[in-house]
Image (cartoon, rainbow, N blue to C red):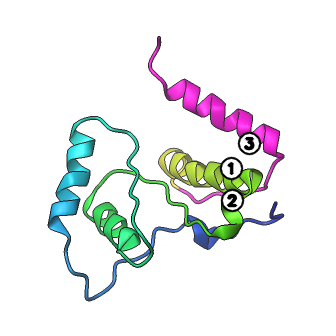
Amino acid sequence: MPSTLLQTKLYIPPLRPNLVPRTRFIERLNQGLQLGHRLTLISAPAGFGKTTLVSEWLARNERPAAWLSLDERDNDPARFLTYFVAALQTLVLSEVEGTTAQYSPVGGSAITSATANQIDSDSPAQ
C-alpha cells in the first residue's frame, strides 16, 4: 500500500481543445441522473473515449463528482480502497470545507469499515 497517495489519480482530467462532442452519450448520462441513479458504470475497451466522455459530462454538469484513475496496481484491494476512500473524501471535503485535503493512508480493515459505513449510511432504510 502506498505511504503517500498520488494526488493526480484523484484529478478530473481537463477537456481537450479539439473535443468532438458526444451529445448522445451525454444525454444518456443525464437521463441516469434524472432517473435518480447514483452510480454509473461505463465500460469499453482502451481508447474508446471513456475518460473524455466523463470529463466532458462533468464539465457540463454542475454536480459535485469524485474521480479515481485506475491502473494495474489498483488490483490490490487495500490499495484500491485507499484510493477509493481518498476520492470520496475529495468530494466530501470540497463540499464541506471548500478545500483539498491531505491524506494519510490507513490500514485495509479501517478502510473497509469506513467504506461500508459510508455506503450503509447512504442506503435507504429497509
Quarter that holds the N terminus: bottom right
Which element carries disc 2, helix, strand or loop?
helix
Q: Is residue 15 above or below residue 121?
A: below
Q: Label 3, on which residue?
A: 111
**Residue 102 visible in the current orientation:** no
Q: Amino acid at mark 3?
A: Ile
Q: Is 92 included in the stretch rendered in magenta?
A: no
Please name the amino acid that badge 2 sits on. Asn
Label 3 vs label 2, nearer the camera: 2
User: Which residue is at a point 43% across and 53% down the rendered structure image?
Assistant: 65
Q: Earlier in the sequence, mark 3 or mark 1?
A: 1
* Displayed quadrant of residue 17: bottom left
Location of mark 2 (residue):
75
Q: Disc number at residue 81?
A: 1
Answer left or right for 120 relative to 95: right
Task: Give the vertical position of 68 relative to 33 (above or below).
Answer: below
Look at the picture and state if 42 lies above or below 38.
below
Q: Which residues are magenta?
A: 99-126
